Amino acid sequence: MSEWFENDDFWRIFGKCMFQPEKFERAASEIDAIVAFCNSPVRDVLDLGCGPGRHAVPLALAGKRVTGVDLSPHLLAQARAYAEAHEARAEWVQADMREFRSPGDFDLIVSMWTSFGYFDDPEDDREVLGLCLENLRPGGTLLVDIAGKEYMARNIEPVHLTELDDESLLIERPTLEDRMCRYSNEWLLIEGDRVHRAHWHHNLYSARELADLLSDAGFEPPLIYGDLEGNPYDLDAERLIAVARKP
């Protein structure tokens, strides 16, 4: 049985709910901060779960050799179009992150905006981190950016309504499941007389849980931050940033 993220219609229909123009602008402003977390020069970058290229394209424009990996043909088509519009060169690979291997080819791997943790079996998350270790050069850096369990538990709303720029309406009905280890959401997208419905989920990790996962995968003890500016992960943090290096 396929998992929710393998259905390309989900990304085609609901992508506009996730990838608004302001998020592309924000991503472009984050590149210097991302690279600054690395102790060594960064030449080759892997954007794992690159989506429509929000970070991959600005990284390429900053002079990095970028490989963007995603499972969705629809999102990769958008990434290619985004790159072409900005005259950026990158390699785009359609692949499952649980299977993508390119041993020792990258100085930096990034997984941005909770692209990590989609899988029904949490052991697959461990597999992904093991592959990241394999794909990095010695001393290379993995940066994982997710919504932490602490933030999600504190801010979850039973029902949330958003009006999008095209006047369609998104109704969200999120829940925490499996002892708060999984964030599950039902989305209803109302476009005029049409209603699209989808269910999706991802695994939730606290700062300690994510750090332990990275250490178990073979990384040096990771550094944990609350944002890309390097602020502490505390009760005010909206993001959970883990920076882990390959020995």
Image (spheres, grey):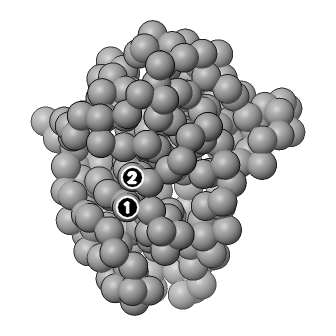
Q: Amino acid at mark 1?
A: Arg
Relative image position of residue 134 (x, y in whole percent): 30, 27
Of residue 115 and residue 162, the one placed in the foreground of this image is 115
Element type where label 2 sits in the image: strand
Residue 149 appears in view: yes
- Number of residue marks: 2
Q: Amino acid at mark 2?
A: Asp
Q: Do the numbered discs 1 and 2 sit on residues whose CB atoms are within 8 Å?
A: yes
The residue that label 2 is drawn on is 44
Q: Residue at x 19, y 49 (%)?
A: 95
Q: Is residue 76 above or below residue 1?
A: below
Closer to the chain start, of discs 1 and 2, is: 2
Q: Which mark is residue 159?
A: none
Q: Give the quadrant of residue 7.
A: bottom left
Q: Quadrant of the N terminus?
A: top left
Circle 1 packing at 10 Å, graded few (<14), some (14-19), many (20+), is: some
Relative image position of residue 26 (x, y in whole percent): 65, 68
Q: Is residue 159 above or below residue 175?
A: below
Of residue 148 and residue 186, the one placed in the foreground of this image is 148
In whole angstroms, how far apart are the C-alphas of marks 1 and 2?
A: 5 Å
Q: Give the quadrant of residue 224.
A: top right
Q: Is residue 223 above or below residue 64?
A: above
Outermost residue toward the front in this view = 41
Residue 162 appears in view: no
The residue that label 1 is drawn on is 65
Q: Residue at x 55, y 28 (%)?
A: 244
Element type where label 1 sits in the image: strand
Q: Residue at x 52, y 80 (%)?
A: 168
Left or right: 140 as drawn, with respect to 48: right
